[in-house]
Amino acid sequence: MNCLLWNCRGANKPNFRCSIRYILKKFNTDILALFETHAGGDREQRSCQGLGFENSFRVDVVGQSGGLWLLWKAEVGEVTIVNSSSQFIHARIVNGVEALHLVTVYAAPSASRRSGLWEKLRDVVQAIDEPLIIGGDFNTIIRTDERIGGNGQLSPDSVAFGNWVSDLFLIDMGFKGNRYTWKRGRAASNFIAKRLDRVFCCAHSRLKWQEAFVKHLAVLSSDHTPLYIQLCLEVKRDRASDLLYSKEKLKKWNKEVFGNIQQRKDKLVQEIQAVQDFLEHNQTDDLLNKEDVLIKEFEVVLEQEEIVWFQKSREKWIALGDRNTKYFHTSTIIRRRRNQIEMLKDDEGKWVEEPEELAKMAVEYYQKLYSVEDVDSIVERLPSAGFTCLTREEISDLSKPFMSIDVENSMRGMGRFKAPGPDGYQPVFYQDCWEVVGQSVTNFVLNFFETGQLPNEANDAMLV
């Protein structure tokens, strides 16, 4: 079963009819949900009938705004409209012995008009004990990285939306395609993009349809992208055959796509150089954006190269490190040479190489570092009038309580592949799965700052 959810911004527009026909022809769709149809009466009836669906349910427009349509084909099964309002339609779909609850949402664009919506949807979701999919235009974001341009802070409504998702244990089904589902502005100076449209499911649905996915289609006759949901029933396969098939595909991919990192680096450097040559004579938004994208791609390739060599090194060490092999001896020698001090520069700027002099310089350095005289000399350099006092504004700023966004920014600022703790998880796991684990991590960190209590195991480390 495949679904299409779209804030079409007007179902009577000629360009909408052309766009929806193209989409439905290209993407097999069993259920179609349209938001902001701006259509009512006879025109609404004619528009619905012309889309090729046998059944439909509609929430009428209010004045010149709103309007929700839910259309479905007969082969979908028995569809019952459980509940509806100006901002959502709740349908229960039964096909044979399988049941699915589909809630399509259009949250009003202003926070005041969608006041109370999250509470209503909370009641809807909590009353469901069967597989659930809930999606549409929520008109707000959850994280600051889900937008380009505009205000850099999360609104209270966004925070409430994020809490609603966490409290109900909803799972974001992710997406294929462009990250942002709504765009506005035709110039770089006023361009804004956000991920306002998304699809959630419950754990039951995610387990039942493990291969289900959401695809962000191209933005056509609306400023919102259509969301295409494809549910794939689980198919049992021979795991051994799958692994052999994957092995051959991965070997081919490694050889033809990923393997030749040096060529990818050289090509990117050439493209970066060409763009920078153009920028020397003509500075445009397109060229600046192109340069930024290419540099980021180059950094990704460098990171991939580093990971490849790290993994290859670890692979050999695990396989050969405990044996009396050439690799073991070479690794030991390299490490010993890296840790050996062969030259030091003295106070006069001269390089010293004699072992006796090097040992003497090391001892003198630490004796001076921890001497009383050295402490006295530091005290003498302290300001005689004392340190400058903090202003009230500075004290207030330093006294602010830590917020959820501070925890997330700190986590995302960590090196993605820094050494893991005893649990084996590197920062990249928490960064890429923040939608799932973020709330738990945030609660843990904020609880420490509130109580000053930290579990002993939080300081555990692995010594190698």
Image: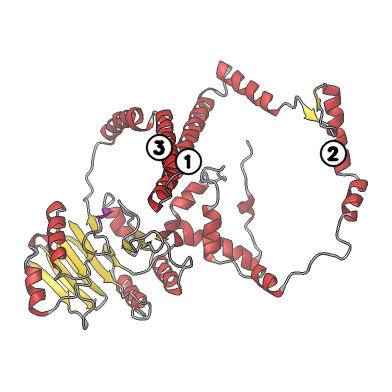
Q: Say above or below: 173 vs 450.
A: above
Q: Quadrant of the C terminus?
A: top right
For this rendering, which residue is in front, 148 or 248?
148
Q: Earlier in the sequence, mark 2 or mark 1?
A: 1
Instruction: Check disc 2 and report the residue beneath it.
Output: 366
Q: Earlier in the sequence, mark 1 or mark 3?
A: 3
Percent coordinates x, y for residue 95 in the rendering: 14, 61
The residue at the far bottom in this view is 63
In the image, taking residue 360 as reference, residue 226 lies left or right, namely: left
Q: How far is the residue under mark 2 from the one under mark 1?
A: 40 Å
Magenta: main secondary structure equals: strand
- Amino acid carrying label 1: it is Glu
For this rendering, which residue is in front, 81 or 192?
192
- Amino acid carrying label 3: it is Glu
Q: Who's the residue at 25% across and 68% down the image?
A: 103
Q: How far is the residue under mark 1 from the one under mark 3?
A: 14 Å
Q: Say above or below: 112 vs 7.
A: below
Instruction: Check disc 1 and report the residue beneath it.
Output: 299
Residue 447 shows in this picture: yes
Instruction: Check disc 3 and report the residue beneath it.
Output: 271
